[in-house]
Image (cartoon, helix red, strand yellow):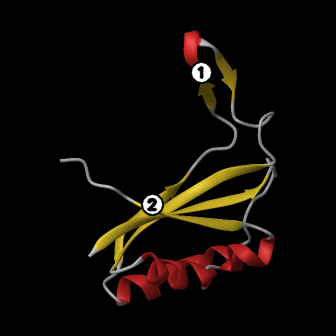
């Protein structure tokens, strides 16, 4: 099986706080993937308040906020046979109800 990162993106909403219902929906989604034995890493939420971007020549800026309209809010790692199967798992995530999207990328293992 291959591993895929599901990268969650939201509009640049620095004050977004999920409701208990939204948190429960996400937990149910994760549990359904775990029940299929396809959850490789439950991932984490990434801070949108404490972030820096490092560029060449040691240039450092606060967060990615001025450069993008969306921010990466978190990730999950799933284990599936194909990217299409990982996409199907992503389609069931409740992030779409709040205007977010999910980028699905294969994790290439270094040898």
Q: CA distance from mark 2 to mark 1?
A: 26 Å
Horizontal side of 54 relative to 49 (left or right) equals left
Say which residue appears at 45% left-offset and 75% top-offset. 83
Task: State which mark lies toward you, 2 or 1.
Answer: 1
Q: Residue furthest top?
A: 57
Q: Residue at label 2? A: 43
- Residue under the point 64% across and 51% down: 72
Residue 77's x, y, as percent? 41, 65
Residue 72, compared with residue 78, is above or below; it is above
What percent of the width, then of the height, locates residue 9? Answer: 68, 58
Q: Relative to 8, is 34 above or below?
A: below
Q: Earlier in the sequence, mark 2 or mark 1?
A: 2
Q: Quadrant of residue 48?
A: top right
Residue 12 x, y percent position in the rendering: 80, 49
Q: Quadrant of the N terminus?
A: bottom left
The answer to whether 57 appears left or right of 48 in the picture is left
Q: Position of residue 21 (x, y in %)?
A: 70, 80
- Return the residue nearer the eye: 41 or 105: 105
Dot 1 alpha-carbon crowd within 10 angstroms: few under 14, some 14 to 19, many 20 or more: few
Front residue of 105/43: it is 105
Which residue is identified by label 1? 55
**SS type, badge 2:** strand
Residue pictured at 17% horizontal, 47% vertical: 111
Residue lying furthest left in this view? 111
**Is residue 15 placed above or below 102 in the rendered structure?**
above
The front one of 42 and 79 is 79
Q: Secondary structure at mark 1?
A: loop
Q: How busy is the neighbourhood of tag 2: few (under 14 within 10 Å), some, or many (20 plus)?
A: some
Tell whether 4 sits left or right of 75: left
Q: Which mark is residue 44?
A: none
Residue at x-position 69% and y-position 21%: 61
């Amino acid at each position: 099986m291959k591993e895929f990162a599901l990268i969650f993106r939201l509009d640049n909403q620095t004050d977004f706080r999920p409701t208990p219902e939204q948190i429960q929906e996400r937990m149910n989604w994760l549990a359904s993937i775990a029940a299929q034995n396809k959850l490789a890493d439950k991932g984490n939420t990434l801070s949108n308040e404490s972030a820096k971007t490092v560029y060449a020549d040691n240039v450092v800026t606060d967060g990615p906020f001025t450069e993008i309209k969306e921010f990466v809010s978190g990730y999950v790692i799933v284990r599936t046979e194909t990217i299409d199967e990982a996409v199907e798992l992503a389609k069931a995530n409740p992030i779409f109800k709040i205007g977010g999207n999910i980028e699905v990328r294969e994790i290439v293992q270094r040898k």
